Amino acid sequence: MNRQYANYRAEHKLTYPINVLRNSARRAAKTRYILASDIELYPSANIIPRFLDMVRRRRNASMPQLYVLPIFEVKASLRAPLTKKVLIDMMHNKSAVFFHKWVCEECQKFPKRDEWLKNLPPENTLEVFATTKRDKSKRSWEPIYIGTNADPFYAEELTWEGKRDKMAQSYQLCLMGYDFNILDNAFLVHAPGIKTIVASEEKRRAPYVKVNNMHHARLMNNLKSKYAKNAASC
């Protein structure tokens, strides 16, 4: 999003239709596998060839599969790491943190994340580190993942300003029985800088949060009715 558009949007009090854009990007994709990431998230090196090699070796999975990329933030003055070794070093010296650590830690708290940081596989490999479900203990989790267009699309009535724009889709993935595979040697890094809560920004977004909460409650109720037999576990 360029500065001119951002200023126009602010002046006219327009919302940012994040899920419309995510879905549009997915529908326009020409490949089987899709990473519906955000523009400010930078991928580690060589994900594509390593991922394609990995999925060729994992064709016998019985449940629908997603491949989750852990997300981190680094100080604005530093370059985003391209390898896990550099990322781990930056985590140790506190120049990098888990994504949304100071804003909404539960939203990006992927399972076994401390163990993930202790595991350093060979640099030219990519495997699944752990497989999990999105159950009730992870109801705030909003992972970004590699999937396909067979997966549910995002709810387009939810805006970026209103927050929680991926939670309804994550809940639907749980209801549909998806496996969430945490990748061991691939990740995303947010730029610019490490996010913190800004009081004026929270005040500005409060009306949009209220609207998103209303949409979110309706979506959740509809999904519970549609997938009633699995609702108790999600």
Image (spheres, rainbow, N blue to C red):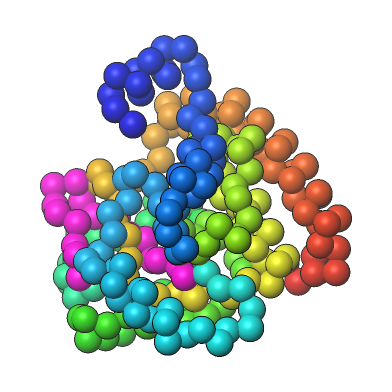
26 falls in the magenta region: no
Q: Residue at x 42, y 18 (%)?
A: 10
State the residue lying farthest toward the front: 30
In the picture provided, is 168 more to the left or to the right than 81? Answer: right
Q: Residue at x 32, y 60 (%)?
A: 188
Residues in magenta, as a range: 67-83
Numbered-mark total: 0
Quarter the N terminus occupies: top left
Measured from the top left, where is residue 172 in percent x and y?
68, 59
Q: Residue at x 56, y 50 (%)?
A: 166
x%, y% of residue 13?
A: 49, 16
- Residue 54 in percent (x, y) is at 38, 81
| Magenta stretch, overall SS | loop
Front residue of 57/135: it is 57
Query: Which quarter of the picture shows residue 42?
Result: bottom left
Could you tell me if residue 118 is visible in this image? no
- Left or right of 114, for residue 207: right
* Residue 180 shows in this picture: yes
The C terminus lies in which quarter of the figure?
Answer: bottom right
Figure quadrant of residue 33: bottom left
- Against 180, residue 170 (above or below) is above
Does the magenta-highlighted stretch encompass residue 79? Answer: yes
Q: Is residue 154 above or below residue 92?
A: above
Whole-percent x and y of residue 51? 35, 74
For this view, does 113 lie left or right of residue 122?
A: right
- The residue depicted at 43 percent of the width and 54 percent of the height is 30
Residue in the foreground of this view, choosing between 6 and 152: 152
Q: Is residue 98 above or below residue 8?
A: below
